[in-house]
Image (spheres, helix red, strand yellow):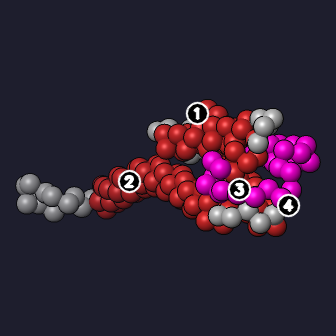
Amino acid sequence: MRHVLTSFLALHWAIVFALLALICIDGSRGVATALGVFGATIEDSRFIDLDKFVVVAPLATALLVVSVLFFWAFVEALINDATSQGVDSVARIAFICASGVLSLIVIGGAAQGINGMFMAVAVQLAALLASYVAMLAERRSVVAAASGEGEIRAVAHGMAKAAAHNSLLSLISGRTGSNPGGER
């Protein structure tokens, strides 16, 4: 069984962060537009010029790195089987980096006096958390199904082993469990 939900969510977040990075590098009001996509409104840009290279380059680079991490998780989900740990580790790193970038956006936005940054980023963080929980739930259900199948096999093997052992003991002792002739 493949990671269907995991691959879909990883691809979704890879596209979202790649588009945000692409919007950021737009020459005219790129960062302001990207923050507008988050839901923040920039009414007054008197504190900082958001189109400066010092602001655009680090933000676009961070968003692109997060996008690449999510795309890596997508590729891992496509290549690896359901019991592999590779998807979990890459997805965990991608979600941690995404949360870090969003936290830095909140800190930078609050420092510059941009209104609505906290609520906009809080919604995005909640969506990231819900996606991570959904990925974990899918992973655990796949692992539980695989281990449940193994447990059934182990129980059946143990029962067959016990039946063979009891049969062998009854043959050695000369007693049979069901004697149709009524003899000893």
Label 1: how many Cα within 10 Å (few below 14, some 14–19, many 20+): some
Task: Report the residue at 7% width, 55% height from top.
Answer: 181
Instruction: Indicate the amino acid at tag 1.
Output: Leu
Q: Position of residue 55 (x, y in %)?
A: 87, 49
Per the model, the C-alpha gap separating discs 1 and 3 is 40 Å
Q: Quadrant of the C terminus?
A: bottom left
Q: Residue furthest right?
A: 54
Name the mark on residue 42. Answer: 3
- Residue located beneath label 4 in the image: 47
Task: Write down the region rendered in magenta.
Answer: 36-63
113 vs 167: above or below: below
Front disc: 2 or 3: 3
Kindly identify the residue that appears in the image at 65 percent across and 50 percent down: 36
Sequence-earlier tag: 2 or 1: 1
> Label 1: which residue?
78
**Residue 175 rendering spot, x and y as whole percentages:** 24, 61
Instruction: Please name the residue shown 80% across and 43% down the image.
Output: 60
**N-term mark: 2 or 3:** 3
Task: Determine the CA span between mark 2 and mark 1.
Answer: 28 Å
The amino acid on which the numbered mark 4 sits, given as a three-letter code, is Phe
* Disc with the residue nearer the chain's start (2 vs 4): 4
Residue 112 vertical position relative to residue 156 in the rendered view, above or below? below
Does residue 16 appear left or right of residue 110 in this picture? Answer: left
Q: Earlier in the sequence, mark 3 or mark 4?
A: 3
Task: Label 2: state its secondary structure.
Answer: helix
Circle 2 sits on which residue?
152
Q: Nearer the viewer, residue 171 or 2?
A: 2
Evaluate whether residue 78 shows in this view.
yes
Is-magenta flag for residue 50? yes
Mark 2 or mark 1: which is in front?
1
Q: In the figure, is residue 38 to the left or right of 93?
A: left
* Secondary structure type for disc 4: loop
